[in-house]
Amino acid sequence: MENNKKTYTISVYTENNIGLLNRISAIFQRRHINIESLSISVSEIEGVSRFTIVVDITEIQVKKLIGQIDKQVEVIKAYYHTDEETIYQQLCLFKIKSNLLFEERQIQNIIKENNAIIVTVNKDFFVIEKSGRASEVDQLYRELIPFGIMQFVRSGRIAVTKDEMKITQMLAAFNNL
Amino acid sequence: MNTETVKTKQQTTKTTIRISGSEAVVKCLIAEGVDVLYGYPGGAIMPVYDKLYVYQDKIHHVLTRHEQGAVHAAQGYARISGRVGVAMATSGPGATNLITGIADAQIDSTPLVCITGQVASHLLGSDAFQETDIIGISTPVTKWNHQITKASEIPEIMAKAFYIAKSGRPGPVLIDITKDAQFEEFDFQYKKCTGVRSYIPIPKTDGATVVEAAKLINAAKKPMIVWGQGIILSEAEDQLKAVIEKAGIPSTWTILGASAIPTSHPLNMGMVGMHGNYAPNKLTNECDVLIAIGMRFDDRVTGDLNKYAKQAKIIHFEIDPAEIDKNVKTDVAVLGDAKASLTQLLPLLEENSHKEWLQKFKDLYAIEFKKVIENDLYPTKERLTMGEVINEINNQSKGEAAIVSDVGQHQMVACRYAKFNQTKSNITSGGLGTMGFALPAAIGAKMAAPERDVVAIIGDGGYQMNIQELGTIFQTKVPVKIVVLNNEFLGMVRQWQQLFFDKRYASTEMVNPNFVAIAEGYYIEAKRVTKREELSGAIKEMMACKDAYFLEVCVEKEGNVFPMIPSGSSVSDVRLS
């Protein structure tokens, strides 16, 4: 097994209960592992939440983490994947002064070239939305920074895996017991 | 109040009764077969205590002198009986005082249900009097926890708590109940929990892995078993014995595995680990197949992992998939419950005796006996040794007593030298190493197994960490035997200071009170022994006493525990002096 650090995306299917985020994040904290990004949402199954956690660690470490996460009572199943095994995106929002949109024509080109969209415009500010890989978001950030960014926010990674995860079958198996 | 209006639900024959949340808690405990619980009342849990008063003929609440005493007593109860121990406390400090015991139960896989009161739900997060985020605090040290804010949740959550605590790899569960939920009335009906969809208590055993394990064992010339508490928790003692005997495998145990197989069994080769026996530690690095069963390769067992059984194929029988390859890389992992897995393994094993290999253990034992054991058990020096005290208890109990030890030198001596004829006889804080564990744990153990002699072996340091529980012993008249091995030092720390810190005895010497007078203050019969010729008679008197008994034995001040694997060294570098 590799001893090199790598980016892993951990996907965790869980019950939707109060305190579970704390329980899962404590597993990382206890091992002094930094979470690069975290996103929690509903999943394809009603009542089941999905955590997407990105870490830069070794495969040995991520395997042990999965074991610890998986054994939590309210965790249905945890998986880890490399970037090649997932399709992943992040979303970011830029809030920029509206006058720049008219005074700095370049901004419109930047938005177009980066496949970003304008979400809203009002007389004070407009908001650009961009989804993509972290590197693409960074690229847009670098291009917009000279013009002045009022606010910038980037979501955690969300990812779907190329392989099936078979959560529905797992839950069905339990119900048939 | 207690209006038992029986209602029949539509389309079902199940009856519900309208009761308060607090009464429901007590009824759930009774439904789960809880006969004793340990706790300490306070504001936020008072409604439940009020109902415990009403139901006192059905369920016995033991008032300890500190919440830590309550949780350790519940642990002692669970460890000797295999049943779920129950502790109860109020919110805030009551709840936080449980934490050490909960952490101890978590690392030692002890089934507990801890119930804490909480401020009323409208006060949550307001920094109310005695409010603390006990769910947040207990999360990393519980198998599961949950906060109840509505009475109607109580039956389902309580049922789930008991199921989760006991099933699979056991552990502590904490249920926090707001005061308004305790007062609230609802239609009560109880159903035991039989499954939780996100939780697989026992992973499926893959038959192929059992076959693979059997192949390795059958081909082995120098196999060695290390069993842990998993044998006791799964009640696989008979299956283990059958496997050991059929395949003729020298077998060793971790501290929590002690007593699963009688000490006198010819294939029982003693304890592994930092203060374990010489042969099993040395031969860990000579065996060709290491069969680990229901143990987790703790660092106190393995020493330096880079020099641990590198020459051996490793087979790991384990219920918790997260333990596989956690510390030691396995060649064959057999997931599942030890009892079931060993039952499958047995018919696949070939009969063997491994005589030469077994002789190696015996030869090394002879060395250990001459260099260490003889001096510990049959000393010629003036001062008493810890070992001879344990030996005398063995002689008089004939190995039938349950030994509850605290943490430190006396613990290692007790686990090394205690003779065990029956399983579930060694109750000690292994993983967390909680000083103060033994006195309250002995209370719980004796209550769960009143027919057994329960002897607490405690150092003078640990004794004073929960000495207040003498009050519980006095009030409940629980006849535990308390032996304090007094060397006027925090002995294990002192030993390390001697060996690794040039004898700079920083804060380890203890000026102790008159322990006999303290025990007598609680009206507990007490005696102090300082001379060898008094020892046997005193232990005889203690064992014969129908009530609780306190015996202080003044032992040599600077005795050391050997063998010893210095921290960070290899198991085969185990020292005899």
Image: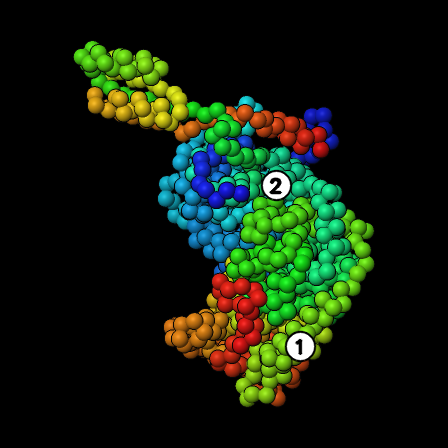
| Marks 2/1 same chain | yes
Q: Which residue in the rendered view is the most extreme toward the left?
A: A103
Q: Chain of mark 1?
A: B
Quick one: B148 or B417, which is closer to the camera?
A: B417
Quick one: B364 or B251, which is closer to the camera?
A: B364
The mark found on residue B366 in the picture is: 1
Q: Amino acid at mark 1?
A: Ala
Question: Does residue B470 lie above or below B367 as drawn?
Answer: above
> Is residue A123 in view?
no
Give the mark, 2 or 1, whose residue is nearer the N terminus: 2
Q: Position of residue B456 (x, y in %)?
A: 59, 70
Give the structural element (helix, strand or loop) at label 1. helix
Disc 1: CA contacts within 10 A as few (<14), some (14-19) or many (>=20): some
Q: Position of residue A13 (x, y in %)?
A: 54, 32
Which residue lies under the disc numbered 2? B160
Q: Amino acid at mark 2?
A: Lys
Quick one: A177 or B355, which is closer to the camera?
A: B355
